[in-house]
Image: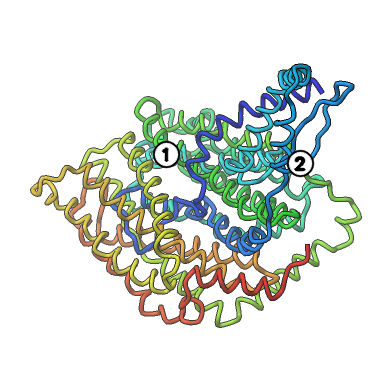
Amino acid sequence: MFLHDIMKRTLVQTLVIVALTLTTTNGFSSPSNLRVASCQSSSFVGMQQKSSSKSSHCGPSFLLKERTFRTNTIMQQKFETASDEEITKKNKDGSTAWETSSGDDLKSMAATTTTTSSLETINGGNNNNNNDNEENAALAWMKENVFLGIEPTPEIIAIMTIYFVEGALGLARLAQTFLLKDELHLGPAELSALTGIFTLPWTIKPLYGFLSDGVPLFGYRRRSYLVLAGILGCFSYAAVGADFWGVLNQGSAAGAVSAAEATTSILGVQISVLQATIGCLLLSSATIAFSDVVADGIVVQRTRDSNDPKVAGGFQSLCWGSAAIGGLLSAYFSGSLLETISPRDVFGLTAILPLIVSGIALLIDEEPVSRNDENDGGLATGVQDQISDLWSALRQPSIWRPALFIFLWQSTPTSDGAFLYFMTDDLGFGPEFLGRVRLVTGVAGLVGVWAYQKFLRNVPIKDILFWASIASTPLGLSTLLLITHVNRDLGIPDGAFVFGDDVALAILGEIAFLPTLVLAARLCPPGVEAVLFATLMSIFNGASTVGTEVGALLTKALGVTESNFDNLALLTVICNISSLYPLFFIGWLDEVGSQSEEELEQQAILDVAANPIDK
């Protein structure tokens, strides 16, 4: 018991620190680093938010799962009653027993306790129990206000840590950009093309789910894959950070070629530093995507196993909040660190984060899969059934038409890669400034979430998408003032213009993206919700890749380079105007997008009332 009390006190002290940060994000239920293709950002921050996957990566799946279970939460709250107060009373033998009393009973007991001996007895008990009562009160407060009603078990802390690390891995985002740009000397078109390639692992998320569900690794479906992903992620970041330990630089020793072009024969294959860097960055993206899918699977399983429906929605918000904190903390430092250390050093520091996932994964409460379960073919049959059900769902016009619209809407080209070079090479912005922009736009995204939840939940989804796309066009075109330096003639500093433009686009982008998640939830029929949603998000991420690659081709065709920005204005116009063409197909949303989120939730509540879920 003594050891248990010490551990509990330590946990309380730790959770107090977490509470001070986490409470600032309570109430938000959507990832803040997602941007729509129609919102062409005026900074590289926009490119990262749109094409990296928590735009994909950061996990759009959080909101859908919260929407899926929110109905149960609302219905549960209507039938919950206040629990009786528990008090401790000193027994004659000095032991403490828990009894249940109403508030009136407590007042009566207090009024009758007037004798000196009784007071001494009660005070003695209070002196012994004050610390425990304070700790219990603190734990209860944190459980309800910080952990949203969820018991903070070691497994819950582990899951929160995994999502926090996913967000914090953005620490190497700007380091990746400056490594490819300055050390490996890639141009705007090449950098944009690689940005799209690095998103590819996020386009096959359902495959990771099928693999994790159907092929246990070392007897586990979740834990082992998290450990493996953490180890591979650490290796990929460490290899880039250590410049591959000098193994690939031997070919450039004579100085005949650059370090990026130098090749070294490994197992009979000629590999350059550039190729190895791309391979490691692609591997790191894949490990994050796989970890995200596995973590989502754990969350879904825990919410389904819970006897308390209110745990479901709170769990999703808790996980997203952890990722948001990690992303915001890493946003500024991703730039400020580059002012003092090299991009490779930042990769070396970031390599520590995946190892945290490997270690914390051991706290996941998971029963090993028996050999009989592995050999009876049941898992493989289940995966085959999921694929069959998924194909049947996607063949329905009511699903593939909205999905195709989402693809078209997100696949419009972007000029963000070229604009990054303009900001750094023409305007002279450094990494620290770009880090501040990332931080401010991340916070602005949260403002967009709040604005949507506060004012737009009763507006039809189709109307939000239409008018957000319309409004994004003049905002995107406003970057022409910066490209032509007209803003200086107007007395607006370059830095202030970038901040203002990006904040507006971040808010509008979040307002436009949230309805797509609600739309995705509306499209998923019972029985295939998880796999279909993962497929829809893969379609979204794939469309983002297409848009980035088309933007790279346009950048190359117009001759925009790191030293020639003559056609950057034309590229910006083409990308922004082309973002309007998906609106010609917005009629594909008539069947599912004519209702607002509020109307969809009310309908879901009525459905639950008519068909109550067995507990």
Front residue of this view, candidates 118 and 491: 118
* Residue shown at the point (45%, 51%) measured from the top left: 32
> Which residue position holds label 1?
331
Residue neighbourhood size for the residue with mark 2, other residues' Cα within 10 Å, grouped as few (<14), some (14–19), many (≥20) = few
* Residue shown at the point (28%, 50%) measured from the top left: 419
> Hey, which residue is sitting farthest right in the picture?
372
The reply to whether callout 1 and callout 2 are in contact (CB within 8 Å) is no
Front residue of this view, candidates 4 and 41: 4
Instruction: Name the element at disc 2.
Output: strand
* Earlier-in-chain disc, 1 versus 2: 2
Q: Quadrant of the C terminus?
A: bottom right
> Which residue position holds label 2?
101
Q: Which quadrant of the figure has residue 218?
A: top right
114 left or right of 195 in image: right
Q: Position of residue 111 (x, y in %)?
A: 70, 31
With respect to residue 114, does 142 lie above or below? below
Q: Position of residue 489 (x, y in %)?
A: 8, 48
Q: Position of residue 273 (x, y in %)?
A: 47, 38
With respect to residue 72, does 594 lie above or below? below
Q: Which quadrant of the figure has residue 92?
A: top right
Asked whether residue 270 is in view, the answer is: no
With respect to residue 484, does 611 lie above or below? below
